[in-house]
Amino acid sequence: SEWPNNADRPVEKVSWDDIQKFLTRLNAQEAGNIPAGWAYVLPTEAQWEYACRAGTTTAYSWGVDINSSDANYNSNIGQTVDVGLYSANPWGFFDMNGNVLEWTADWYAAYSSGAQTDPEGPAAGSSRVHRGGSWSSTGAYLRSAYRGSGSPGLRFLNLGFRVGFQQQSADVASPEMSIL
């Protein structure tokens, strides 16, 4: 961590590749404690945005404007802060906007045209998607719809992740996902 000895802050300076190793170890360690067919994962880009929006249609889950009482952004504090310092979104998720950018499972590509429900990212690429903006981002980068990307090996002091918990079955008609 860029700011060690802060156990309540988000993980940062972790690459997408590092997270895959972490998730493999976490799933192996917890195999006896989680339901059969379920696994800890990175959320897809669509799952991340769905959880971030929490049923809202505005630029941010709290409304159309942003200020320093809404999120850690724009270098107003100059580093990460403890998770939960700002209000949760309507579904109870903290810091989906700001504090650290969050890696998602998807490869980056231009969006397909037209409306889509639960779109899937491409099968391959050179950059992975990150979402949410960070403590060093301007307010526009914290919008629920903002998307950025980076090389899977990239580690940076404003880049972290959020773990999801997903059923790994072939039942695509009723996929389930929880973001932790």
Image: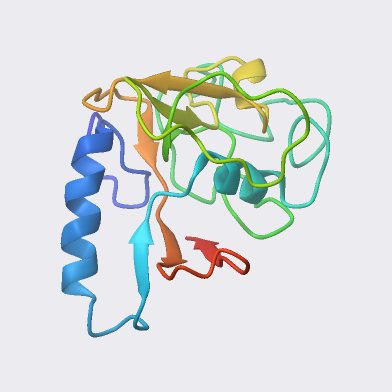
Which quadrant: the N terminus? top left
Q: Say which of 66 and 49 sits in front.
A: 49
Residue 41 versus residue 76 in the image, above or below: below
Name the spot of residue 163 as percent of width and height, x first. Answer: 40, 54
Asked whether residue 78 appears in the rendered view, the answer is no
Judging depth in this view, the residue of 151 and 97 nearest the camera is 151
Q: Splitting the image into 4 quarters, where does residue 24 fall?
A: bottom left
Is 35 above or below relative to 106? below
List x then y, in percent, for residue 53.
Answer: 71, 44
Compared with 139, 116 (above or below) is: below
- What residue sits 23% from the left and 78% below the top? 31
The image position of residue 164, as x and y in percent, is 44, 58
What's the residue at 45%, 32% (across, down)?
A: 122
- 151 on left or right of 91: left
| Residue 143 image-quadrant placement | top right
Q: How many marks?
A: 0
- Residue at (39% x, 49% y) in the render: 42
Q: How is the image coloured?
A: rainbow
At a point 66% along the width and 17% down the height, the residue shown is 140
Residue 170 spot, x, y in % from top left: 46, 68
Whether residue 54 appears in this view of the structure is yes
